Each structure stands twice: as structure tokens, then as C-alpha cells.
Amino acid sequence: MAVKIFIKRIVPEDRAREIIPLFREIRSLATNHSGYISGETLRSMDRPDLFLVISTWHSSEDWKKWMASEDRKKNQDKIDALLGGETEYEMFHYGFSE
């Protein structure tokens, strides 16, 4: 069953120019990973430092494999170092199924 992942990041204004290319790089890596369907990056209009990525995967297992991949970890470590904190993730599935 397809899942959606909500990825939340608070990006300090003085770090945005450094981090945005890393966002693009990690998206590029994800698009080539098995199970990736789509992704979009949103920026809050009320809080310009808040970014939300909505990533869609064929299954929770595909997402878990992506999370465990070394390419993702290397890029994510760079992002978190610049953020000065950790990225937050939440996984959702469609509808009322279990």
C-alpha cells in the first residue's frame, strides 16, 4: 500500500542558500530509488523558515530502505548539521485501512 511521508524542517534564514541545493540533491537521489513515486516541497507562508516535504512511496518497506541508504544518510547528515537540529518524519497511509 502506498504511503506518504511528511518531512518537516526548520531552516534558519541565514542557512537557506546552503541547504536548498542539498534538498535538491536528496530529492534527485530519492527519484532514482526503488519505490519512489513523487515528492513536493512546500514553504510556509506564515513561517518562511518552515519547509514541509510530502514524499510518496509504493510501500512503507520502500521508505524504510530509502531511510537506511548510505546516500540518503550522508546528505541528511549535512542538512541536519546546517539546520542545527534533526529533521522530523511522519509516515501516513491512505484512508481507514490498517
Image: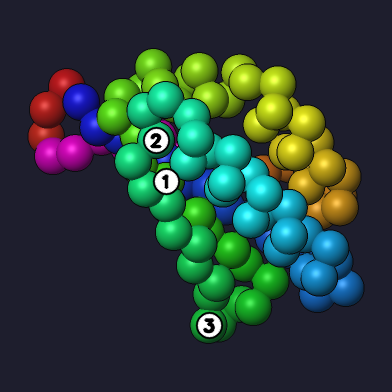
Q: What SS does tag 2 mark? A: strand
Q: What SS does tag 1 mark? A: strand
Residue 83, label in figure: none
Check if mark 3's residue and mark 2's residue have beta carbons within 8 Å. Answer: no
Label 2 or label 1, whichever comes before in sequence order: 2
Check if mark 2's residue and mark 1's residue have beta carbons within 8 Å. Answer: yes
* In magenta stretch: residue 7: no
The nearer-to-camera label among 1 and 3 is: 1
**Which region of the structure is painted magenta?**
90-95
Q: Amino acid at mark 3?
A: Met
Up/down of 61 relative to 56, above or below: above
Picture coordinates of residue 2, whole percent (x, y): 25, 32
Q: Nearer the viewer, residue 32 or 83?
A: 32
What residue is disc 2 on?
36
Picture coordinates of residue 23, whole percent (x, y): 66, 54
Q: Residues within 10 Å of mark 2 (few under 14, many from 20)?
A: some
Q: CA distance from mark 2 to mark 1?
A: 8 Å
Q: CA distance from mark 3 to mark 2?
A: 27 Å
Q: Nearer the viewer, residue 89 or 71?
A: 71
Q: Which quadrant of the figure has residue 62? A: top left
What residue is disc 3 on?
45
Up/down of 96 relative to 48, above or below: above
